[in-house]
Image (cartoon, grey):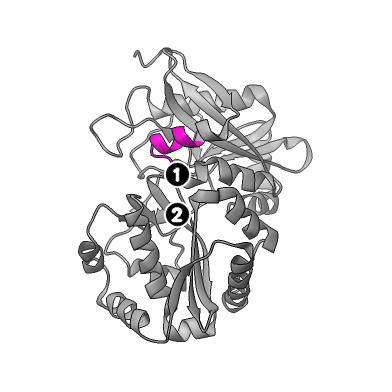
Amino acid sequence: MNAAAPLTVTPCAEAETWDRTVNAMGGHPLQLWGWGDLKAAHRWSAERVFVHDASGEVVGACQLLTRAVPGPLGGFVYAPRGPVFARAAGAPGAVRADPAPAAIADAIASYVRTSRRAVAVSLEPDEPAGSLELGAGWRAAHTPVLPARTLILDLTQSEDELLADMTKKHRQYIRKSEREGGIEIRPVTTIAELDACLEVYRATSARADFGLHEDSYYRDALTMLGEHAAVWASYVDDAPVAFLFLAASRRTAFELYGGMNELGQRLRANYALKWHAIRAMRDRGVTRYDLGGLINDGVTTFKTGFASHEDVLAGSWDRPGPGYWVWNRGLPLAKKLVRAVSR
């Protein structure tokens, strides 16, 4: 196909078709239908669009979340870990060069511009930093939504290889928490089980001083993500002491939420729990395990012990619309509030 051939953007209204396509293209779980439904139930709206080349082939897909912003600025349009790009045949993980990702991004921005008033379109591709080059008109966001710095485990490795890449302390704590304290790790599949985990989450929030959504948000996440939700908890005497909530597409598992109470801390329950989740995702056929971002806190220190490397993704890129400079410079608090509800 000629790189200059026009691209067409069309909405998708069928959840099964959408998820099948996103999974076939190696897309991120935050681009799956259920994540859009979750955000639409909590102050956003969601639209899913396919990008077709001149032959009609789908070469890109993008779940667009829109949040109203103050005054006449319209909405902030955000693609969490999107767009999803077609992959090159015979090159696992590599984005196809034709059409260029920049052309796909431009087509999506043009579609948004002609369909609504948007102060910005913010794309956040799940691709390595430096691997994509967006064209003129795109600028790195001053306030990224999800952190670009993260740690992604390669689950095509054996369990022995994954363990060998951890710190010695992490291997020791995994073995210790697996065999001591009477800990049992079980899947969390019901709202009642999740509610018990939310008690643990509230204790974690109070201890670490971070904000939470309302309980209904996490209940909706479990329900709306459906088979793409993966939740486990560590139990002592049938009560959860730690939990971990992931979203998973065919290619990628992504950590969303997790916490532990004081007993879980003493037993280091989070070590064995995370290792359990990593192995479970590997057994499921997932090939990438994203620990959900590194932001220079105590949790980051814990996460980085699971591998000897770090990853940097492409980050958040804005296509400015009318009023962008007011939004970007004059309304920092409003912008922070809108971007802060990414999960």
On-image quarter of the N terminus:
top left
Residue type at the position of mark 2: Phe
Instruction: Kindly identify the amino acid type of the residue bearing the numbered disc 1.
Output: His
Residue 296 lies in the magenta-colored region: no
Could you tell me which secondary element the residue under label 2 belongs to?
strand
Q: Which mark is residue 266?
A: none
Give whichever of discs 2 and 1 has the lower sequence position: 1
Quick check: marks 2 and 1 in contact, CB under 8 Å? yes
Residue to which mark 2 is pinned: 254
Q: Residue at x 68, y 63 (%)?
A: 215
For the C terminus, which image quadrant?
Answer: bottom right
Q: Residue at x 35, y 68 (%)?
A: 275
**Front one among 181 and 265:** 181
In the rendered view, would you say 278 is above or below 108? below
Question: Mark 1 — residue?
Answer: 28
In the image, residue 109 lies at what x, y percent? 55, 28
Which secondary structure is most common in the magenta stretch? helix
Separation of residues labelled 2 and 1 (CA atoms): 8 Å
Above or below, 334 relative to 31: below
Between 331 and 107, the one nearer to me in the picture: 107
Q: Which residues are magenta?
A: 19-27
